[in-house]
């Protein structure tokens, strides 16, 4: 039952969608609302566009893998449905304040924020917050509504309509991709605040068979104070089977110790730290994907992160793992240093920079300003290569660590001609520059591709090109995980359950296309349910059987692998239908030519390149697996 908020009039209503099946209150419902309530062809900044923010029916539940909130709107960067997710406590804050979902239309006359409290939503003025970063905004709103309030905020980048502006929740947890922060800015919406518990019965009213709230003492929490209470969340969201949730949590806590990736996530410096031995050439982007041999850049050691860790302001409620670490050097706003796995390469090696403090400071500043680190890094790398080739006189240079802070500020504020140009993203900047600059914009659907290089892992390349919402590094599991020689053998049986059998990582054929589609469908199902990908099958502790048991335990309904795959297919189909509607039936599914033409030259991935004919055969098999008509793409 989403709240419908009209910022133009200030009216707030509820719409009962409980009779509809299959949306689970997440992105599928948001896509339905976007299709029903908005006209085709609207500019993403038009007041009539719809912004959807939801914990859904599972997100925000005190259980492993259920801490995700979805942010969804027509993307200012891609022009299709842009979906970003925030981990951390915000989803639980939404549920605790009495809202599963918000659908926001219109544009406020003045800068404003939404307050969700006691099962009600109201609009409040925020002009005093104009220009503040996400940390200062969060602090100010918590001072106003209580230290336990949970806040999703934009910074100056969103206010200035930077096309890849992000939303940042509770200081450290970003919903980074596709410019959702700019949609907030276009609506004059500075933040969403969730404060105060819902009155008795509000959350339960939307359940067919309401049951008592789980006793979190059974999950190993200290007597008298649950994790939710310590995080200011009030009572946790209700579940149908508290004992099953307790058992799943106990299993996860034990299993993550021996699961290679979960243990890496839990340990220090963490799986986003890129610490240890240098990576193989071709695994990640160096200098805008132009370096195909040895990077020539230093990899940090684990000890390099000493003294830079910051205590998080609240990890994911109900999950034993603490994946997202917060790192920043002294002298910056450190609480915004939530380090996602893409940040180090995007703001480091992709720019020819290997100084750790420079990279960590840049990441923290991006989160405070509200900038997606992937698109910013890709856009700066594009500008650096254009400058190097004489296409952007006076542009930035690869390896210039001292210039990076100023570049970030200029983009977020659009403070000069270069900052304004780069705030549009690399594809639009390339069209302005002309003279062949488009060859150096590493984009699909005008969104910068993530820094995991797809040449040695062609399934990733297929995912970048064909996922209907745009390129995401976490749209599906990576090919190397399923390589018979170097892969994670423990996950092979799980992958086989969805038809993704082991195969050499670099193999690009029709079966690669089918395998990619099957994995994309699985992880699309997790996205649709607001289940954390970093806790789930096939490589993490929550196997398919655990995932289906988790849904049954929360909702009290039968749920199977077939149901999971069906909801994944529906989300993909809905995103594709919206993309086709907005693009006039012609989708950009073209990878940058460099990935097809320039092979990796050194190391174990030597010779890896996405050969065009093989890629097209794999694309056809991908479409066939998902039942899509390939004739409607450009």
Image: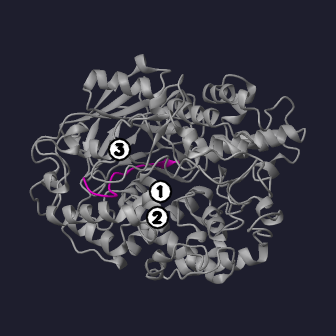
Q: Which residue position holds label 2?
A: 260
Q: Residue at x 84, y 43 (%)?
A: 434
Q: How far, Cα to Cα, is label 3 from label 1?
A: 16 Å
In this picture, which residue range is highlighted in magenta? 62-74
Of labels 3 and 1, earlier in sequence is 1
Q: Residue at x 39, y 37 (%)?
A: 312
Q: Secondary structure at mark 1?
A: helix
Percent of width and height locating residue 11? 29, 35
Q: Residue at x 44, y 31 (%)?
A: 335
* Marks 3,2: beta carbons within 8 A: no
Of labels 3 and 2, earlier in sequence is 2
Percent of width and height locating residue 448? 66, 50
Residue 206 versus residue 426: which sits nearer the camera? 426
Q: Which residue position holds label 1?
A: 264
Density class for disc 1 (Cα within 10 Å; few <14, some 14-19, many ≥20) is some
Q: Specify the quadrant of the image occupied by residue 393.
A: top right
Q: Residue at x 70, y 60 (%)?
A: 280
Instruction: Kindly tell me whether residue 47 is visible in this rendering.
Output: no
Q: Specify the quadrant of the image occupied by residue 97.
A: top left
Percent of width and height locating residue 281? 74, 59
Count of numbered tags: 3
* Marks 2,1: beta carbons within 8 A: yes
Q: Quadrant of the C terminus?
A: bottom right
């Amino acid at each position: 039952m989403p709240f419908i908020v009209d910022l133009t009039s200030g009216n707030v209503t509820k719409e009962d969608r409980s009779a509809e099946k299959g949306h689970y209150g997440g992105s599928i419902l948001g896509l339905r609302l976007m299709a029903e309530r908005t006209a085709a062809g609207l500019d993403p900044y038009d007041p009539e566009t719809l912004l959807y923010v939801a914990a859904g029916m599972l997100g925000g539940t005190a259980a492993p893998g259920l801490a995700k909130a979805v942010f969804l709107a027509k993307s200012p960067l891609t022009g299709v449905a842009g979906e970003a997710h925030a981990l951390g406590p915000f989803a639980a804050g939404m549920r605790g304040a009495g809202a599963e979902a918000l659908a926001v239309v219109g544009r406020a006359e003045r800068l404003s924020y939404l307050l969700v409290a006691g099962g009600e939503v109201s609009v409040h003025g925020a002009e005093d917050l104009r220009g503040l970063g996400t940390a200062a905004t969060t602090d100010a709103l918590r001072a106003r509504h209580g230290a336990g309030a949970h806040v999703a905020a934009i910074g100056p980048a969103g206010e200035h309509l930077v096309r890849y502006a992000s939303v940042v929740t509770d200081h450290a947890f970003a919903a980074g991709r596709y410019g959702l922060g700019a949609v907030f800015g276009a609506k004059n919406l500075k933040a969403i605040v969730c404060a105060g518990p819902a009155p008795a019965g509000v959350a339960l009213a939307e359940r067919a068979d309401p049951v008592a709230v789980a006793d979190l003492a059974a999950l190993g929490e200290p007597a008298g104070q649950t994790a939710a209470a310590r995080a200011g969340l009030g009572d946790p969201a209700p579940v149908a089977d508290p004992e099953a949730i307790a058992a799943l949590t106990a299993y996860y806590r034990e299993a993550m110790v021996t699961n290679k990736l979960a243990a890496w996530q839990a340990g220090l410096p963490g799986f986003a730290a890129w610490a240890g031995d240098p990576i193989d050439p071709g695994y990640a982007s160096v200098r805008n994907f132009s370096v195909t041999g040895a990077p020539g850049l230093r990899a940090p050691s684990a000890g390099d992160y000493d003294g830079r860790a910051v205590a998080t302001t609240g990890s994911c409620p109900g999950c034993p793992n603490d994946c997202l670490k917060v790192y920043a050097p002294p002298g910056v706003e450190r609480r915004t240093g939530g380090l996602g796995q893409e940040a180090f390469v995007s703001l480091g090696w992709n720019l020819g920079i290997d100084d750790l403090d420079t990279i960590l400071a840049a990441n923290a500043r991006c989160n405070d300003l509200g900038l997606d680190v992937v698109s910013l890094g890709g856009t700066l790398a594009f500008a650096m290569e254009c400058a190097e080739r004489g296409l952007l006189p006076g542009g930035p240079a690869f390896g210039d660590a001292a210039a990076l802070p100023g570049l970030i500020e200029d983009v977020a504020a659009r403070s000069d001609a270069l900052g304004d140009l780069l705030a549009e993203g690399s594809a639009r900047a390339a069209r302005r520059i002309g003279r062949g600059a488009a060859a150096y914009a590493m984009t699909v659907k005008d969104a910068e591709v993530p820094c995991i290089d797809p040449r040695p892992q062609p399934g990733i390349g297929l995912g970048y090109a064909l996922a209907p919402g745009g390129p995401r590094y976490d749209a599906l599991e990576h090919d190397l995980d399923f390589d018979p020689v170097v892969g994670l053998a423990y996950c092979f049986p799980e992958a086989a359950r969805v038809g993704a059998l082991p195969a050499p990582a670099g193999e690009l054929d029709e079966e690669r296309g089918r395998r990619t589609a099957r994995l994309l469908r699985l992880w699309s199902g997790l996205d649709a349910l607001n289940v954390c990908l970093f806790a789930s099958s096939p490589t993490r502790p929550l196997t398919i059987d655990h995932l289906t048991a988790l849904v049954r335990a929360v909702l009290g309904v039968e749920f199977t692998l077939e149901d999971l795959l069906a909801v994944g297919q529906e989300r993909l189909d809905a995103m594709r239908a919206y993309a086709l509607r907005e693009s006039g039936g012609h989708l950009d599914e073209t990878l940058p030519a460099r990935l097809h033409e320039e092979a990796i030259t050194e190391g174990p991935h030597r010779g890896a390149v996405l050969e065009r004919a093989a890629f097209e055969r794999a694309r056809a098999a991908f479409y066939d697996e998902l039942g899509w008509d390939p004739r409607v793409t450009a």
